[in-house]
Image (cartoon, rainbow, N blue to C red):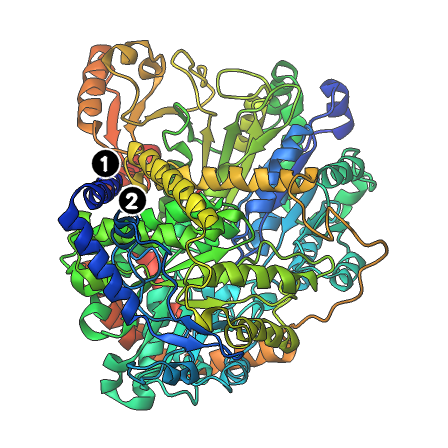
């Protein structure tokens, strides 16, 4: 029996337990009185907020019931925000601006971090650095999110054969630790509220090693323990959907586990993996497939890390998740289902404590839902998706720019995307006043139950195939995603899936010329010059460092600490090149 | 150049029918967005094309080399990660340098390729760029109209500037692949002596890992023979009346090398794992400048034995441990014909039983057939090392 079958069993057992609690609350007078008493206390504790027009409202919306069975169903089956099984939210309090916070009595006035986290990366390191400063200049807490260019994502140097055109396109070009220093220059890396995210997978351990090395250069050897952020490093979804894996899967999983082992012990504030459904969805998966494959990948990582001897209560709280939010109605409750199933699996299958049960979620609005035709409609698409994401109590969120179907976003559209979130969270009264203002409607609950049942069915299918790793090798997830993508295309082609401006209400005439952001040739050349200088300067040390790395790899020791040393003298491509010789290349699944 | 030169006009007369149009498709380097191209591949196959799919994250060099080896009529590129203006230009330049400028190039990239980019790319020689929202049928219609007929430049004229012997060999293979063996083979055999003394045939059921195994052998060959050259003739199923998806190249990593010549053939409705053109192609390859020729059949059934006497020097039968039990083993004809039997995926449960059962079966033959256990997907697998020694022996 694979872990997924055990999660299914645990989820069913939980449902039975909920029903038992409901029955007991209705039939047993003592139990009923206890539920009523607790309900009364909870309601009393909810602080009041005042709307700009003077209306008083509770900060947390609770179901309007006094019936003990319904109270039990809510408190036991869904939980308050921050309580098992976390259907309504991972944390007790969310989306509170400091101003609103002080208006609420009895709350400590610690800085609440803003949920906005915008993904950026373009050109060379200094260009992205400037964009980061632009994006965060009004933020009280700085949260960066980094996109890398194609060569970096595939572990290649900018001087690799035939990649010149891709340098700095769609993300930032990083070849060396010196690029990494430039990328995050003038940010407070040791500040308690600073955090950064790096979207990279195949070469993730090498890139994180570069970040650690860069931080040590700047802040001294003791900086490591203070660093806070996320590296995506989700290699399973690469095999299943996104195709940015460079080493064979077993070697990739070993390097990942090495990194997780290191960060668990030495970087307590780091999230060493972001288990991602986003790319699974963007590759064509249905919302249910996105949730099922992401959760099942997550449980598989937990098994792997435990097999290394790591404690689930130590690495568990450092796992986080990343989901897509598109316009399909399933997204009305997708994150609610994920939080619940993750918590049940972690508690009942892996025996994890509460901090390790939290499905901490970053959401990004759907890139696939955006189109180039009459692209300003994308502003509306993104706004609706944002609303769905926050209605699902996401912990942080990226809103796409309207011009993304054809370019790395121009500043104008990045600004509009950021402001969409500000309008929703600051201008609108929805979440800043009543944090769960849209939660718990009958529609949401019906979607929730349907999605949960479908996700569990998908778990059973994966279990039948022998679990996630066996199914991945059999190309199960890939073929499921591909056929879903095919169906989606057919629906758009056939008009049964309306896309405004594309297959409905299409404008006549040529679309106006759009402004695109590209990296100029001279910049690409500058990157090559810098790389050449670095390689020349470190020629002697590089060979030695790579030999030392090879020894560690061959001995089966933890490579991550060695990578931190190697990046001082070696470029990304030099390191991946040597690792390829040692462990081979990834063979694509088609 | 050791490639025998056949009179093209004579070949066309013997051929009597035209071969299906071959299109190579790929996703550029540092780009893993394969969802669009996978859909387009299927549509092109349905429309009767033989599609050779090279996969994603492929360099200009790999794409140009493959297009030439496969004698593709055109290259379709799906690019979503930027840098397309440069990448498409480099592909065109590469084709030019190789004397293969009659191979067409078309592509698309959703919204990432702007109308202005497309204009520039077409100016540089790209035949067509498709934008987001183009219906699939529009792409298929274009490919039919533009590439179904032979290229406008007469072939012999285009060949006037050929510097690449691979290109000439590839074109000869196309002609050979379309004519009947009986007429052609004596013509080739009589003209030139055989150079290659080792032609190895790989066969076995679909999904046993033949392609992966061959790719791993290629890695070992390239390391062991720093100047050696190797040819692969690979077969994929395809009906007589419709197209075929030739996807072996997409899963190969080490075979993407200038010292490896690879050609994919569709079985074109012939059962048994090979194509009518196989014998002729093999005779050509044996007479070209290679040190080793590997032939991979399409997945076969129990009673198939694709390599009739004399077609290859050594026959290797590859199976996974899941062949269905001892009784099934008795029916597998290749277990009698093979020189070497390989149980791949030997890390799977049931591998021990499989090895014991097959070993018993081979002992009954009393021919001293070799039995090896491999895990081709494991880097540096010792079983594959042993197989490599067997191949060279």
- Disc 2 to disc 1: CB gap under 8 Å: yes
Return the residue nearer the eye: B186 or A191.
Answer: A191
Which percent across, then down, holds residue B87? 64, 60
Gap in angstroms between the C-alphas marked 2 and 1: 10 Å
Residue A545 figure quarter = bottom left
Q: Residue at x 67, y 31 (%)?
A: B49
Classify 10 Å Cα crowding around label 1: few (below 14), some (14-19), many (20 and above).
some
Left or right of residue B384, residue B214 in this image: right
Return the residue nearer the eye: A579 or B257.
Answer: A579
Of the residues under marks 2 and 1, which one precedes in the sequence?
Answer: 1
Chain designation of label 1:
B
Tell me if residue A277 comes above or below residue A224 in the rendering. above
Tell me if residue B18 comes above or below residue B84 in the rendering. above
Return the residue nearer the eye: B116 or A372.
Answer: A372
Q: Which residue is mark 1?
A: B347
Return the residue nearer the eye: B100 or A279.
Answer: A279
Tell me if residue A232 comes above or below residue B335 in the rendering. below
Left or right of residue B244, residue A273 in this image: left
Left or right of residue B348, residue A122 in this image: right
How many numbered discs, if any? 2
Classify 10 Å Cα crowding around label 2: few (below 14), some (14-19), many (20 and above).
some
* Secondary structure state at the residue bearing disc 1: loop
Q: Residue at x 48, y 79 (%)?
A: A532
Which percent across, then down, holds residue A501? 74, 53
Do circles 2 and 1 both sit on a common chain? yes
Q: Which residue is mark 2?
A: B378
Chain designation of label 2:
B
Which percent across, then down, holds residue A588? 44, 46
Q: Quadrant of the N terminus of chain A?
A: top left
């Amino acid at each position: 029996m694979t872990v997924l079958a055990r999660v299914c069993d645990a989820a069913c057992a939980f449902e039975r337990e909920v029903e038992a609690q409901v029955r007991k609350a209705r039939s047993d007078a003592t139990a009923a009185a206890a539920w009523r008493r607790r309900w009364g206390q909870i309601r009393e504790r909810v602080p009041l907020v005042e709307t700009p027009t003077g209306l008083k409202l509770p900060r947390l919306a609770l179901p309007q019931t006094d019936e003990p069975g319904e109270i039990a169903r809510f408190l036991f089956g869904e939980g308050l925000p921050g309580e098992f099984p976390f259907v309504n939210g991972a944390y007790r309090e969310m989306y509170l601006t400091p101003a609103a916070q002080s208006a609420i009595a009895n709350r400590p006035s610690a800085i609440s971090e803003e949920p906005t986290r915008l993904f950026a990366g373009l050109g060379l390191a200094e260009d992205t650095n400037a964009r980061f400063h632009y994006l965060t200049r009004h933020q009280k807490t700085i949260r960066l999110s980094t996109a890398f260019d194609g060569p970096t994502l595939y572990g290649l140097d900018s001087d690799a054969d035939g990649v010149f055109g891709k340098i700095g396109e769609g993300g930032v070009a990083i070849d060396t630790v010196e690029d990494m220093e430039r990328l995050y220059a003038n940010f407070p890396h040791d500040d308690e509220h600073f955090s950064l995210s790096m979207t990279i997978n195949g070469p993730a351990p090498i890139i994180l090693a570069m970040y650690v090395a860069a931080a040590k250069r700047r802040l001294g050897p003791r900086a490591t323990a203070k660093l806070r952020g996320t590296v995506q490093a989700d290699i399973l979804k690469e095999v299943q959907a996104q195709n940015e894996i460079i080493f064979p899967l077993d070697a990739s999983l070993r390097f990942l586990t090495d990194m997780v082992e290191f960060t668990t012990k030495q970087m307590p504030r780091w999230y060493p993996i972001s288990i991602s459904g986003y790319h699974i969805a963007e590759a064509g998966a249905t919302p249910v497939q996105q949730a099922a494959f992401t959760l099942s990948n997550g449980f598989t990582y937990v098994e792997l890390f435990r097999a290394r001897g790591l404690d689930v209560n130590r690495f568990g709280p450092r796992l986080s998740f990343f989901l897509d939010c598109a316009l399909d109605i399933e997204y009305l409750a997708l994150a609610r289902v994920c939080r619940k199933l993750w918590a049940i699996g972690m508690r009942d299958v892996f025996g994890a404590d509460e901090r390790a049960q939290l499905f901490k979620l970053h959401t990004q609005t759907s890139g696939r839902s955006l189109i180039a035709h009459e692209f300003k409609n994308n502003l509306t698409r993104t706004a609706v998706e944002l609303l769905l994401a926050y209605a699902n109590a996401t912990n942080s969120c990226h809103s796409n720019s309207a011009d993304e179907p054809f370019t790395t976003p121009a500043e104008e559209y990045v600004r509009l995307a950021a402001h969409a979130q500000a309008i929703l969270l600051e201008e609108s009264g929805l979440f800043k006043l009543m944090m769960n203002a849209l939660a718990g409607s009958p529609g949401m609950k019906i979607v929730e139950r349907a999605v949960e049942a479908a996700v569990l069915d998908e778990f059973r299918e994966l279990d039948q195939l022998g679990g996630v790793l066996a199914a991945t090798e059999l190309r199960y997830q890939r073929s499921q995603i591909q056929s879903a993508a095919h169906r989606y295309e057919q629906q758009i082609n056939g008009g049964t899936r309306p896309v405004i401006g594309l297959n409905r209400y299409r404008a006549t005439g040529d679309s106006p010329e759009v402004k695109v952001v590209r990296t100029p040739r001279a910049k690409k050349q500058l990157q090559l010059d810098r790389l050449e200088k670095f390689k020349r300067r470190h020629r002697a040390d590089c060979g030695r460092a790579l030999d030392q790395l090879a020894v560690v790899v061959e001995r089966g020791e933890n490579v991550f600490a060695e990578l931190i040393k190697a990046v001082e003298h070696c470029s990304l491509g030099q390191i991946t090149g040597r690792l390829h010789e040692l462990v081979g290349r990834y063979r694509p699944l088609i | 150049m050791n490639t025998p030169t056949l009179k093209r006009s004579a070949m066309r007369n013997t051929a009597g029918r035209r071969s299906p149009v071959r299109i190579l498709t790929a996703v550029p380097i540092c780009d893993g967005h394969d969802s669009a191209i996978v859909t387009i591949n299927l549509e092109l196959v349905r429309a009767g094309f033989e599609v050779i799919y090279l996969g994603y994250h492929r360099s200009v060099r790999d794409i140009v080399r493959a297009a030439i080896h496969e004698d593709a009529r055109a290259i379709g590129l799906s690019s979503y990660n930027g840098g397309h203006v440069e990448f498409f230009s480099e592909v065109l330049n590469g084709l030019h340098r190789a004397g293969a400028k009659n191979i067409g190039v078309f592509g698309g990239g959703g919204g990432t390729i702007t109308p202005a980019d497309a204009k520039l790319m077409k100016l540089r020689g790209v035949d067509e760029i498709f934008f987001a929202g183009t219906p699939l049928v529009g792409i298929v219609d274009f490919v039919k109209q533009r590439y179904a007929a032979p290229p406008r430049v007469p072939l012999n004229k285009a060949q006037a500037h050929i510097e690449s012997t691979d290109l000439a060999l590839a074109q000869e293979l196309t002609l050979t692949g379309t004519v009947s063996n009986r007429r052609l083979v004596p013509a080739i055999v009589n003209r030139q002596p055989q150079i290659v003394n080792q032609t190895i045939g790989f066969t076995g059921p679909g999904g046993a890992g033949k392609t992966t195994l061959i790719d791993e052998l290629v890695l070992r060959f390239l390391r062991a023979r720093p100047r050696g050259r190797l040819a692969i003739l690979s077969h994929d199923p395809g009906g007589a009346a419709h197209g075929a998806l030739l996807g072996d190249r997409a899963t190969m990593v080490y075979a993407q090398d200038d010292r490896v010549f690879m050609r994919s053939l569709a079985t074109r409705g012939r059962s048994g794992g090979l194509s009518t053109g196989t014998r002729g192609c093999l005779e050509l390859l044996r007479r070209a400048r290679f040190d080793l020729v590997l032939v991979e059949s399409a997945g076969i059934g129990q009673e198939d034995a694709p390599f009739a006497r004399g077609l290859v020097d050594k026959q290797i039968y590859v199976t996974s441990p899941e062949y269905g039990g001892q009784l099934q083993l008795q029916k597998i004809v290749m277990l009698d014909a093979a020189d070497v039997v390989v149980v791949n995926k030997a890390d799977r449960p049931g591998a021990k039983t499989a090895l014991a059962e097959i070993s018993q079966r081979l002992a009954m033959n009393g021919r001293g057939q070799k039995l090896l256990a491999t895990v081709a997907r494991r880097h540096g697998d010792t079983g594959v090392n042993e197989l490599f020694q067997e191949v060279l022996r």
